[in-house]
Image (cartoon, grey):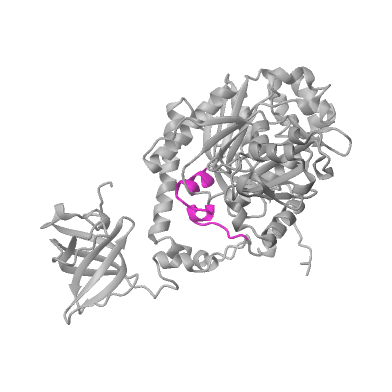
Amino acid sequence: MTNPAGLRTHYNGDLRVDHVGDQVSVVGWVARRREHGEHLAFVDLRDHTGVVQCVVPGSVDVRSEYVLRVTGTVRHRLEGTVNAKLATGEIELQECQVEVLAEAEPPPFPLDDRADDVDEMVRLRYRYLDLRRERMQRNLRVRARVNSAIRRAMEDQGFIEVETPMLMPSTPEGAREFLVPSRQRPGDFYALPQSPQLYKQLLMVGGTDRYFQIARCLRDEDLRADRQYEFMQLDAEASFVTQDDVLAFISEAVMAAAEAVTGERPPAIEQITWHDAMDRYGIDKPDLRFGMELVELTEIFASTDFNAFKASCIKGIKVPGGAAEYGRNKLDGLTDRAKSLGAKGLVWMKVEDGGSLNSPVAKFLSDDERAALVAAFAAESGDLLLIVADAWHQTCEVLGTLRNDLGRPPVHEGPYRYVWVVDFPMFVGTDDAGNPKPGHHPFTHPHPDDIDRLESEPMSVRSLAYDLVLNGWELGSGSIRIHEPELQARIFRLLGISEEEADRRFGFFLTPFRYGAPPHGGFAFGIDRLTAILAGEENIREVIAFPKPQSGLDPMTGAPTAVDANQLSDLGLRLLPRSN
């Protein structure tokens, strides 16, 4: 801890037996007051470092959350009164002089671990009180260490921090934006940045070489545990680099942040292709902390007489020991869940002694098919097998969701399993006109080995796009960008974007590339999500000082609020009547 200054000589949580005999001054809030006989009282004084017990005269009127300055002498606690649960539990302050710096009304909820059970809207309404709690102070300091470690790691790799504008043109191709009306140009609007994507690429054209920024981004999307209107991300871009270079830069920043919090450096981050992630885990953000990988069964049933298994792809997952846990009602629930995800149905089988299968469909399978099925799963007595037959993508997605439903631990539980997902599809599906739709964004570079198939087999083309995943949460994504105007024009033609439309929508961005753009690529990852996992939290709101609840309405400030009619007039705006 740095040297304290001002009204205190020491931080409360730093006092130890080494300070016995020293006269010290500490400050903070009254966490607890206990009477000790007729003339003395124990006051637990709290600051962000911890609590220290102060023995004060009983006549001193101090109550919960009063702000005090206490000057006293550090003494050993009496035998039998040591508190092993406190870092300062072997000592206390005696011969204390107390100065009341501020009185306090009783707080609306206890400012300790009991507040974890308080309704979140109450905590957010009094967030300034909630932040005094040890948990919240710890989380804010975890976040600060993450930010500091990221900055050092990027600077050590030759990156420079550059700020980009908060007021930018609207790019409606992405998520819903927050718009800002222009007072000087009534009827025109700025947009708040969903990311600094455009500007960071222009920095590369401008010769910046290696840029980073801890950037505030905004998206008008429905809120959830891992999403806020406002979020912070490490944004980075580098010139004259390959995909492997970008992955190495970002890996270093992430591992430095993790080490700063946990004290241990994670192992090298492994890689998996998008196809393998889908094929093995049924999702493009796989959680590698648990098994239950998808098992390929298509060949086993290539000649089956069972109509439900006459499909292009058959896969399954094994729930170890799940046979006893899942009775008929639960199995019917799993079947309904699979159908809600788009499956035609779900076949379940319970493995019994000797490898026999208990299932309504077992009688429709041959002896060889049943034996091969048990062998493919390496199934044992008591296991539950869940099987889906459909098109490859549908089969994988349904089983991937069921796998997470049944086996995934809370996101913050260790071990921390990072993985790079690479080789994403260049295109996903088609639009109403039959044109392929970009899987990432239209400026993502196709994989060099697949460029010659752009026009002939566009849906088979891979991209140089990549995601970083931690414990099943997508931390961020990035790509190598298209820097060649001719290749960019090919991509636009494939997407059904004419030269005129491209110039109208992206002209301000594309024009600089005519003046010599270097090969470049970048990445951005969410600092809120990384910090939440490292802090042991399920919800990013717990690592943000002043977050919005799921409704988007801030119970502390009342935002969003109505504004004065004169302000609307200055902006050239009129409000429509509110709809019921």
Task: State whether residue 398 appears in this view.
Answer: no
- Determine which quarter of the picture holds residue 554: bottom right
As drawn, 106 above or below 393: below
Region rendered in magenta = 527-550
Q: Residue at x 23, y 65 (%)?
A: 53
- Residue 435 horizontal/vertical position (percent): 85, 32
Q: Residue at x 28, y 65 (%)?
A: 45
In terms of depth relative to the viewer, which is nearer, 66 or 262? Answer: 262
Q: Residue at x 28, y 75 (%)?
A: 62
- Residue 517 horizontal/vertical position (percent): 65, 20
**Side (left or right) of 337 relative to 140:** right
**Side (left or right) of 197 relative to 530:** right
In terms of depth relative to the viewer, which is nearer, 322 or 432? Answer: 322
Indicate whether residue 537 is drawn in magenta: yes
Question: Which residue is at the far right?
Answer: 433
In terms of depth relative to the viewer, which is nearer, 161 or 435? Answer: 435
